[in-house]
Image (cartoon, rainbow, N blue to C red):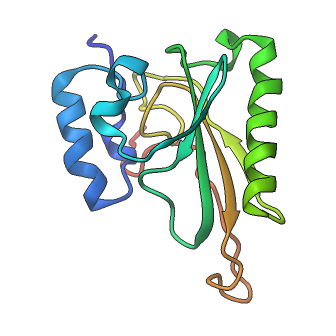
Amino acid sequence: MTKKYIILDNIRRDDQKEVMHKIAEEKHCPFCIENLKKYHKKPIIKEGKYWILTDNQWPYEKIKHQLLAIYKTHIEHLTEMESEAGAELIELFKEESLKRNIPGGGIAIRFGSNQEHGSYGNSVLHIHAHLIEPDLQALGKDEAWRFKFGQPKDYKK
């Protein structure tokens, strides 16, 4: 089986599809350091020992802020992460949250790379974390902002 680095079925936006198809043809990870600048056009906000912090190039709808922390080493599962990396991640998110005056939101990390079934909702298998502040005014009165965990949209058992 050929190693996958991205899951095309999980791509959400048309402007993302063209870039992701090129990445799939290249057969390399877009979040690995040597490839990141080829595809990711947002500036790096801060670099730590374990993480690179940036804004998401393709943010979700109805959000005010979506920060992306990319693990500096290619790993795909939480069990591969250095324990100290968790503290650094929270510190990076804390600093940027204070700088942007983010009153609340959520943090999400998908992990795992079920090659047979297409992972758990992530489009890039390299472990990364999201800090998201939803835009409460853009959301309807009874609407909640949700982060997807699960099978790709066209997964068939």
Say which residue appears at 81% left-offset and 44% top-offset.
Answer: 94
Q: Nearer the viewer, residue 108 or 103?
A: 103
Is 55 left, or right, of 4 in this rendering?
right
Q: Residue at x 42, y 20 (%)?
A: 33
Image quadrant holding the C terminus, namely top left
* Coordinates of residue 51 in the picture (x, y in percent): 62, 25
Residue drawn at point x = 29 percent, y = 20 percent? 28
Image position of 68 with respect to 80: above or below: below
Residue 63 at what x, y percent from top left? 60, 68
In this rendering, position of residue 127 left or right of residue 146:
left
From the viewer's perspective, is residue 135 above or below residue 114? below
Disc tally is 0
Where the N terminus falls, by quadrant? top left
> Where 134 sits versus 22, above or below?
below
Residue 86, quarter of the rendered image: top right
- Front-most of 75 and 143? 75
Q: Position of residue 145 (x, y in %)?
A: 66, 68
